[in-house]
Image: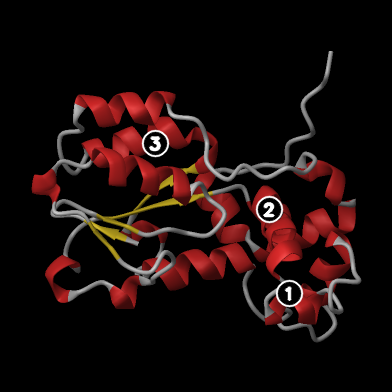
Amino acid sequence: MLLTRHFVFVHIPKTGGNFVREILERHAPPEWELQGLDAHATHDQIPPSHRDLPRLAIARNPFAWHVSWFHFQQRVQDEFFRRISDDGKLDFAGSMRRAYTAGGPLAQQAGALTQTLLDMLGQGLEGAKVGKMESLREDLLSMIGACTTVPPAMASAIQQAPPQNTSKHRHYSSYYDEELRDLIRTKDAPVFDFFGYEWEDAPSRD
């Protein structure tokens, strides 16, 4: 999380937050009084001095988000990942089914991305300015610009800086069968519906 005089940036995991963090740390003017908290701090950790400021965040197509999260967890393997993947033995589809069905830890809850967004933002999607990772550069310029003037050097960096921590895996569509696709669509329906996300096939290689 990053605090400024004009807004608070809430870093939702696996949504391009490292790109945003680097932009702000390099180009925020001193008068913005940039401060860093824990990378994935939630709304209840925002200090009283900043609680009334706009909260900015980035979302992502849940189909892609789940795949990105899974590949990241294959490296770090936290306790939740080990539980749903049978200590790393299950593939993506098997792990998702184990998480969301048949008494899994998320079987009776909303999808993981929906829960993450609501838990971290505090007042729901309507209570924050949330852009889309798929249009990160344009949305970030717009969101910051709605809070304060974007310095020219920052605007240029947002438009031209290379991505950060890009995942090296196949297009998300190759990880889903129809049943799993329907399951994730149902579980993360609030995110799909709020942002208008849809299923997309892999780009052709013509």
Residue annotated with mark 3 = 139
Please rate how many residues cluster around mark 1, counting C-alpha atoms within 10 Å: few if below 14, some from 14 to 19, many from 20: some
Residue annotated with mark 2 = 68
Q: Residue 23 location, x and y as percent?
A: 35, 40
Work out whether residue 81 or residue 165 is closer to the camera in this orientation and state it: 165
Is residue 117 left or right of 93 when viewed as pictured?
left
Q: Secondary structure at mark 1?
A: helix
Farthest bottom residue in view: 103
Is residue 157 left or right of 4 when viewed as pictured?
right
Work out whether residue 127 or residue 85 is closer to the camera in this orientation and state it: 85
User: Which label lies toward us, 3 or 1?
Assistant: 1
- Amino acid type at circle 1 is Phe
Compared with 96, 125 (above or below) is above
Is residue 137 left or right of 181 when viewed as pictured?
left
Please rate how many residues cluster around mark 3, counting C-alpha atoms within 10 Å: few if below 14, some from 14 to 19, many from 20: some
**Residue drawn at x 58%, y 63% as measured from the top left:** 113
- Amino acid type at circle 3 is Asp
Q: Residue 76 location, x and y as percent?
A: 68, 68
Farthest left residue in view: 31
Residue 139 sits in quarter = top left
